Amino acid sequence: MQQWSETLEITTRGQGLYEFTPELGRFMASSRIRDGLLTIYCRHTSCSLLIQENADPDVQADLKTFFSRLVPRNMDWITHTTEGPDDMPAHIKAALTQTSVCIPVNDGRPALGTWQGLYLFEHRDAPHRRQVVLHVLGEE
């Protein structure tokens, strides 16, 4: 059994979905692991990870709109406000999604579907540099 790890830094420009599927391919090629399990972990509490359609950008726009309506800023019951009006809604959105994803690896590639891509879902307004840890365990 072999393992390989790397930390990606993803620069965001504010709220939205940032695809990093191509980086997964490069990571898998450098690992030389053919079959196994790829774990992706986001090291933050105000953004998250999604496997989502990567063919139609309307999907990303609709997801962003849905989450902004589901968890609007300035809700009168929020007490955590020291980091700005977008911070607590960002924590709630991250809690509703996920901070880690596991994907099977077959023949050296993540076993994603035809229209699937992996995204960092930034929930804050300001630009950030986010860290995503990639770890694969398997056989060469």
Image (cartoon, grey):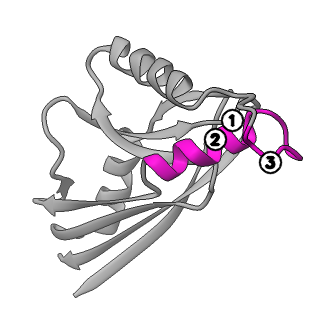
SS category of the residue bearing label 3: loop
* Residue holding disc 3: 79
Residue 53 bears which disc, if any?
none
Q: CA distance from mark 1 to mark 3?
A: 17 Å
Look at discs 1 and 3 and give the one toward the viewer: 3
Q: Say which residue label 2 marks.
A: 90
Q: Is residue 115 left or right of residue 51?
A: left
* Position of 117 relative to 32 (above/below): above
Q: Please state the extent of the stretch shown in magenta in the rendering.
A: 77-96
Which residue type carries mark 3?
Thr
Amino acid beneath label 1: Arg
Task: Provide the secondary structure element on which disc 2 rests.
Answer: helix
Q: Are marks 1 and 2 in contact (CB under 8 Å)?
A: yes
Dot 2 crowding, Cα within 10 Å, few <14, some 14–19, many 20+: many
Choose the circle earlier in sequence order: 1 or 3: 3
Q: Earlier in the sequence, mark 1 or mark 2?
A: 2
Q: Is residue 25 magenta?
A: no
Q: Position of residue 134 (x, y in %)?
A: 43, 63
In this view, 17 is above or below 90: above
**Image quadrant containing the N terminus:** bottom left
Query: Residue at (19%, 29%) from the top-left corner?
Result: 115
User: For the residue marked with disc 2, what is the amino acid?
Assistant: Ala
Q: Which residue is mark 1?
A: 124
1 relative to 21, above or below = below
Q: Where is residue 100 drawn, in percent x and y?
A: 41, 60
Find residue 73 and report its image quarter: top right
The answer to the question of whether label 3 and label 2 lie on touching residues, with beta carbons closer than 8 A, is: no
- Depth check: give the residue in front, 17 or 140: 17
* Residue pictured at 13% horizontal, 32% vertical: 114
Task: Say whether disc 3 or disc 2 marks the residue closer to the N-terminus.
Answer: 3
Q: Residue sitting at 53 percent across and 21 percent down?
A: 69
